[in-house]
Amino acid sequence: MVTMADVARLAGVNASTVSHVLNGTRTVSGPTREAVLAAIARTGYRQNTLARSLARSSTTTLGLASRFVSNPHFADLVTSIESSARRAGYSLVLADTHDDPVEELRAVHELADRRVDGLLLAPSVHADDEALPFLERAGIPAVLLDRFAGSVFDQVAPENVEATALLTGHLADAGHTRLAFVAGLEGLSSTSERCEGFTRVVSARGLSGTVLDGRSETAVAEAAVLSAFSSSSAGERPTAVVVGNNSMTVGTLRALRTLGLRIPTDVALVCYDDPEWADLVEPRLTAIHQDVPAMATRAVTMILERLDGTAPPTPRRERIPPTFRHRDSCGCAGSGVSAR
Amino acid sequence: MVTMADVARLAGVNASTVSHVLNGTRTVSGPTREAVLAAIARTGYRQNTLARSLARSSTTTLGLASRFVSNPHFADLVTSIESSARRAGYSLVLADTHDDPVEELRAVHELADRRVDGLLLAPSVHADDEALPFLERAGIPAVLLDRFAGSVFDQVAPENVEATALLTGHLADAGHTRLAFVAGLEGLSSTSERCEGFTRVVSARGLSGTVLDGRSETAVAEAAVLSAFSSSSAGERPTAVVVGNNSMTVGTLRALRTLGLRIPTDVALVCYDDPEWADLVEPRLTAIHQDVPAMATRAVTMILERLDGTAPPTPRRERIPPTFRHRDSCGCAGSGVSAR
DNA sequence: CTGAAAGCGCTAACAG
DNA sequence: CTGTTAGCGCTTTCAG
């Protein structure tokens, strides 16, 4: 690879001059600049970001640590983050946390070792134990994504409690009295918040509410629903179910089909998260749609503000409001009226 | 941040010794190693990958350049690549090509500037013009993913021609004579190959085959199908359609529903790509399922072999065989028999 | 307006 | 078994 020194030699100038024309960091005379540019063109010189980063102790890189696999929003998330990041001149490095504290710590270490300027983290269940303290100690600016944890970093997540309460209330309004909730991975703030929304409505209205553990996974949710619905007689089983997220909705649908239960006739269904195919299935799914791109770009903005010092001194906690998509799977009177 | 020199000082040794215990690159006496390790623990020292990479001229980083947005396989792809990469000790840096030659070149430059050791690229339509020659000139090991382009790099992609021919033949076997094909972005090898599979069967059997341009996008496909099916009378319009990929399947389904056409009664449907929800819609989709994780891990293996010199001198071109998932949307006699 | 020189934090001969 | 000494390729004072 051709280096800056090579270019300098060819242009008959000092390396520092080459650096300065490249970075526009001091005024360079017309002819000199031309010579340098010519030499660059002739040699096909490309700056070595590594050396540059080392010298400036800044990498213009953002790290994203999140669970990759079985995260339905992952593609959206990465796409939005990458584009806002690179609009600001930053690259993106990834590390998978697997939603496991050990892997998460490894991921965060890895990113820290690569000296990312800032870090976006979807905190795992026990992020407060190791990962967050490490980041704080290391002084790495971070924003927490999708879930809340600790209190020293900026956080941005969708609103969960009210949204799930809305979903639950919607079923109750339609006359259902025996409800089930398919819950996500235990310990995540998103899980407990959605659970809270469900429980709140159930107790406020004196309904019966069963919470099933779907562990945020398709297969687990499928098994949980299968066993819950097949073990109870038709007169006792829930007549409506609220699903806690995307992947578990897939599992729930599979389970109900296996059981031969029709939606919404035999059991009504509503879900947190609005998959791309929500309006393609029969019946179309009534769902809470979260604005992943908004959350992603907001997170990037927050981290950039931390980096350039324009952020407020105290950590921010923000909620992105989701929207209700009223379709047919709820089986309520007004079903089929709105939204696509 | 604490540096290696700090650790060395604290341990009462030379920096090189610290380096060697960290890398296991020469034998260090028990006590010395202990001292170093203790110092590392006490200081919370973390290696600076930047400096290390600069000194070793190797970053143990792989770059992935691909279209992010509206790539249904993206999440799978990244997940698989990241995990195989990090099993081998490599990190992953991303850059979005947007499937546009200009953005692609920018992406590739960016990755090159970061001195990735190897590059995985889903080549855009005109990758041969700029991006590939650049990589070749720069001597950056690369493997092409998902589509073929040029002939100097290793390539791995799903089989397209036979798979699409199979899909088309399946419809023909069921008695359809007027077929339509919703094609992807023009210029991609995957598009032309799938088109070829369709066309081959259509002409071999003397059928009528219309090719619609869906540009690999949901909305475009939707519009194309909408206009094609509404402009022709019931007696002339295709009775079966083959869709070229995932995103366009969504568009096609939406269009058919808008038109009030029932599947498979009014029009039979089969598609290349097997979305997660293929068995959740009514009717369940008959589809070609490609093994994205297999392709991803194979690509990583190939690049690693290039890096450690175990790869054959001549570029490899490999196909990952997809599988046929026979479900109900084809409406053929045997429908509903197999697969979930 | 431009050159010289010191360093960023680490690795890797080269000595001993 | 361990210390010294050059770099890796760039940025950035400091002079001039």
Image (spheres, coloured by chain):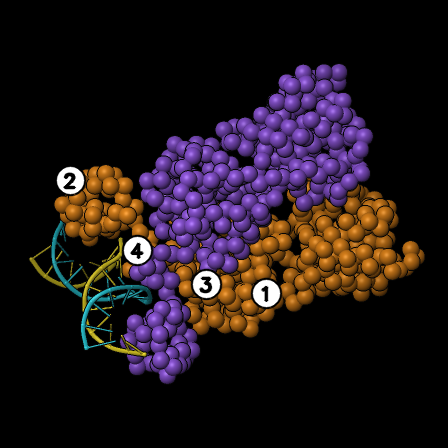
Chain colours: A purple, B orange, C yellow, D cyan
* Residue on which the image places disc 2: B31
Amino acid residing under circle 2: Pro
Tell me the chain of label 4: B
Measured in 3D between alpha carbons, the distance from the residue under mark 3 to the one under mark 2, in whole angstroms, is 45 Å
Q: Residues within 10 Å of mark 1 (few under 14, many from 20)?
A: some
The image shows residue A338, relative to residue A76, as above or below, that is above
Which of disc 4 and disc 1 is earlier in sequence? Answer: 4
Percent across and percent down for residue A38 are 40, 81
**Which residue is rendered at x = 14% and y = 45% of the image?**
B12
Distance (Cα) linking label 4 and label 3: 20 Å
Say whether mark 2 and mark 1 are on the same chain: yes
Chain-order first, disc 4 or disc 2: 2
Residue visible at 57% across and 41% down in the picture: A320
Closest to the observer: B263 or A127? A127
Residue B320, x across and y down, in percent = 59, 54
Q: Which residue is mark 3?
A: B110
Residue under numbered circle 4: B52
Q: Which structural element holds mark 4?
A: helix
Letter of the chain that mark 3 sits on in the rendering: B
Between discs 3 and 1, the one toward the N terminus:
1
Q: Which residue is mark 1?
A: B100
Q: Residue at x 41, y 64 (%)?
A: B113
Q: CA distance from mark 1 to mark 4?
A: 34 Å
The tag on residue B170 is: none
Of residue A96 and residue B89, the one placed in the foreground of this image is A96
Q: Earlier in the sequence, mark 3 or mark 2?
A: 2
Pick the quarter of the image with the N terminus of chain A: bottom left
Q: Amino acid at mark 1?
A: Asp
